Image: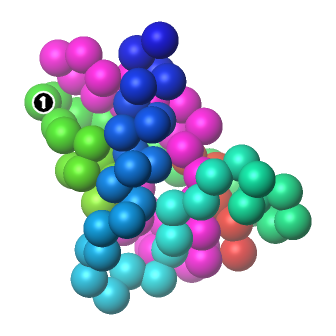
Amino acid sequence: MKITKAVVAMTLLSAFSFGASAAELINSEQAQNLQAVGTITVSGVAGTPMDIRQQLNQKADDKGASAYRVIEANMNNTYHATAEIYK
């Protein structure tokens, strides 16, 4: 249940702009026609969904991805998120 809430929160934040980031947060339906090229993960202490999204954005950009989809997220006192990246 917590994973679902975290994924939903991060998806809702996709409406916000985070500067000149090239990678776009997408959902499962949007990913159906794209080729996955790997995964990225972020983790830390006391992060907000916006912090997590910014970190995922940065890692996806660093890997040259055009899009990413969150496939796992856990938020308690610490957080961990995994995303599939697409070119």
- Dividing the picture into quarters, in which one does residue 15 lie? bottom left
Q: Is residue 60 left or right of residue 34?
A: left
Q: Residue at x 36, y 39 (%)?
A: 9
Q: Residue at x 55, y 44 (%)?
A: 70
Magenta-span inclusion, residue 71? yes
Which class describes the residues within 10 Å of circle 1: few (<14), some (14-19), or many (20+)?
A: few
Outermost residue to the bottom = 20
Q: Position of residue 49 (x, y in %)?
A: 27, 42
Work out whether 74 lies above or below 41: above
Q: Residue at x 73, y 61 (%)?
A: 30
Query: Quick check: can you spot residue 86?
Result: yes
Instruction: Please state the extent of the stretch shown in magenta in the rendering.
Output: 56-82
Q: Is residue 68 left or right of residue 8?
A: right
Q: Position of residue 66 (x, y in %)?
A: 60, 77
Query: Quick check: can you spot residue 63?
Result: no
Q: Which residue is mark 1?
A: 46
Secondary structure of residue under mark 1: loop
Outermost residue to the top = 1
Magenta-span inclusion, residue 65? yes
Looking at the image, what colour scheme do you see? Answer: rainbow
Q: Position of residue 21 (x, y in %)?
A: 38, 80
Work out whether 32 lies above or below 4: below
- Dividing the picture into quarters, in which one does residue 86 lie? bottom right
Outermost residue to the left = 46
Disc count in the image? 1
Work out whether 18 lies above or below 82: below
| Position of the C terminus by quadrant | bottom right
Q: Position of residue 53 (x, y in %)?
A: 34, 54
Amino acid on which disc 1 is placed: Ala
- Dividing the picture into quarters, in which one does residue 19 lie? bottom left
